[in-house]
Image (cartoon, rainbow, N blue to C red):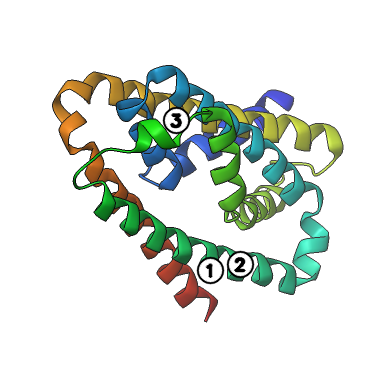
Amino acid sequence: MLFLTFFLGFSTSYLGTVTPSMLNITATKISIEKNKKTAINFSIGVSFIVFFQAFFALLFLKIIHSHPIVLDTIQSVSIIIFAILSFFFFRMAIREQKEITTKKNIKNGFLTGIGLSLINMFSIPFYCGVGATFEMYGWLELDLINVSIFVLGSALGTYLILYHYVLLAEKIKPKIVKFSKYLNFVLGSITGIVALVSLIKLL
């Protein structure tokens, strides 16, 4: 049963992060413009925070669901943050048209990963929805042991997909390095779309 719990956490996190997002595109950008080691440290930082976000979401799932205003508040704050990030990334993209600045800006990949993962509060509503679904089908028990195993799998799943993005970036690095300055346009578009879609859903 514990293996199934771990597998559910791992696969949910891996598949939920496989599509291009702020975090995995940033991991790719760091790998291309900085180095593989910094990108891996970034991935570890992201996964570290995902562990606690998923743990909080599942451990307090019943309390959160009995007070919908909590989720609404988290989503509202996340929308504002992603809108600000979208503006920030577009502004950086315009500045980087003449010079790539990632090498100067990112000195500690782990702390950068922690910071961006903390900003990405959509993880909490995501794991609340996942946890409620799995509990409804009897696949997950919301006790301390099962929740801990599930979120451990989630953290590892997040790390693995980010690591795969880093490996992909290393393989295509010689071909794409000259275009890496445009990745901030991609990040700005992603965060902007996420903020807009989330706002529409919230309304």
What residue type is disc 1 on? Ile
Determine if residue 17 is in view.
yes
The residue depicted at 42 percent of the width and 62 percent of the height is 194
Query: From the viewer's perspective, is residue 120 above or below residue 86?
Result: above
- Residue 157 image position (x, y, % from top left): 54, 30
Label drawn at residue 161: 3
The residue depicted at 58 percent of the width and 26 percent of the height is 156
- Residue 81 image position (x, y, % from top left): 53, 62
Camera-side residue: 85 or 21? 85
Q: Are marks 2 and 1 in contact (CB under 8 Å)?
A: yes
Estimate how packed mark 3 is, as few (under 14), some (14 to 19) or many (20 or more) residues with alpha carbons within 10 Å.
Answer: many
Among numbered discs 2 and 3, the one appearing first in the sequence: 2
Label drawn at residue 77: 2
Question: What is the spatial separation of the Cα atoms under label 1 and label 3, in whole angstroms?
Answer: 27 Å
Q: Label 1 belongs to which residue? A: 80
- Residue 92 image position (x, y, % from top left): 33, 52
Among numbered discs 1 and 3, the one appearing first in the sequence: 1
